[in-house]
Image (cartoon, rainbow, N blue to C red):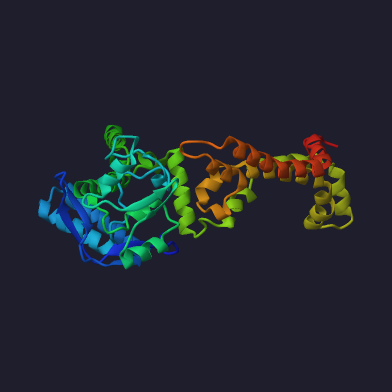
Amino acid sequence: MKNPFESASSYWVRYSEYECRKAADGYEYVVPAKDAKPGVYDPLQDGQNLVLDALNVGMLSMKKAPNEAVKNAVMDFVSRYGLLGLMTAIPTTPTFMDYEAVYLLKNQFIRDETMDTEKYLSLFLPFEKLQFTKKGTHWRWDVSERDMMALELTFHDKPEAQIMCFMREYGERYDWLVKQFKDWAFAFCSSYLYYRNSDALDEDTRAVYRQGMACFDGIAPTYHIELREKPTIVWDYHSLLLAVRMMLTFMGLLNTITALFLPKCFSAYGTYLMRQFFIALPDELRDAAEIDGCSHIQTFTRIYLPLAKPGLVALGIIALKYSWNDLMWPLIVNSSLDKMTLSAGLSYMAGQYEIEYPLMMAGAVLAVLPLLIVFVVFQKQFIAGVANTGIKG
């Protein structure tokens, strides 16, 4: 089997030593040891062993092994791979520190859809609070250790939840970690047994497997697994956007100009529009070109393409309009104001407590002007392209 992680990378922080300590709330937390040293590494380079070790810890818990054996396995995994951001309640926005409340994805540990930011931070900072300075919508961590300063500078463009879990004060509840490992093992075993013995199972037994997986409701806040004819991972729409962002991160395209325009290079609507335009051209043009000895490429480049100029102009204006007004995609692939598109940049003019409407309206006018200029310059070709599309002869 080909290693799916061999061409992927995602740098993370791992401390040299971890320990399990009981906090004032009575729960045990896994945290970096007092004198532990942080180091940056790429866990995906050992991705296969990471997955197998996580499943082994979960299987050990499912077998109801002694608590000491389970704790040793968990601590061994954490010491080998770090906490890996096993945050059980991921914020929906990368910049959750900018707001008074945190909005959470669906998860099995925290049932609230939103909670106070300070309360949310206390769930993962059981012993010491992280010190930070906030001014308006801008904030920064107040760190004095040289190692922490280096980590903040290295990962300054990463989501705030990710930066937080790199800090020395960050901790994960031990019972939540055990539950997470057990859930991974349960999902794997159920899926494996269901498909391995699929031919030997009757429909009632299959229904029990499906009901068990449905009650389990997935192993992550972003998706759930359904036992169908083939293994199926079902994503909800908003969580799928997070998966797209993760994919772009692995590809090294996050916060790049390439990520902004690459998906716009292909359009199902553009294919349909140009197909309708080309089939409207007379067949006699093709026949005449073949009689003159033109190849298919020459027929297309010398006959069809020049005649398709109105259609191409119409498609270009339509694609430009949709791309120019697109809000969702630039916000997904880009967190840098230096590369933010104008339409998406307007959203940053809305503050948490007030909106500068005069400034926003002025920005909206400036955003419309380029489209208006393009339409005025190419309006004849645009109207001809739309009017001639689908008309034969």
Q: Is residue 28 left or right of residue 315?
A: left
Of residues 170 and 132, the one drawn nearer to the viewer in this rendering: 132
Location of residue 307 in the rendering, given as x and y in whole percent from the top left corner: 84, 47
**99 sits to left or right of 257:** left
The quarter holding residue 364 reads top right
Kindly identify the residue that appears in the image at 84 percent across and 57 percent down.
Answer: 294
Q: Kindly indicate the quadrant of the structure image that contains residue 54.
A: bottom left
Name the quadrant of the N terminus: bottom left
Q: Quadrant of the C terminus?
A: top right
Q: Residue at 31% x, 45% y: name it.
A: 191
- Which residue is rendered at x = 46% and y = 56% of the image? 249
Is 265 on the left-hand or right-hand side of 231?
right
Furthest toward the front, the residue is 135
Q: Relative to the observer, which residue lies in front, 362 or 39?
A: 362
Can you see residue 3? no
Q: In the rendering, at what x and y percent does residue 83 appear?
A: 28, 56
Q: Please indicate, yes or no, whether residue 357 appears anywhere in the rendered image.
A: yes
Give how far across and how far down residue 52 sits, in percent: 28, 58
Q: Residue at x 71, y 40 (%)?
A: 273
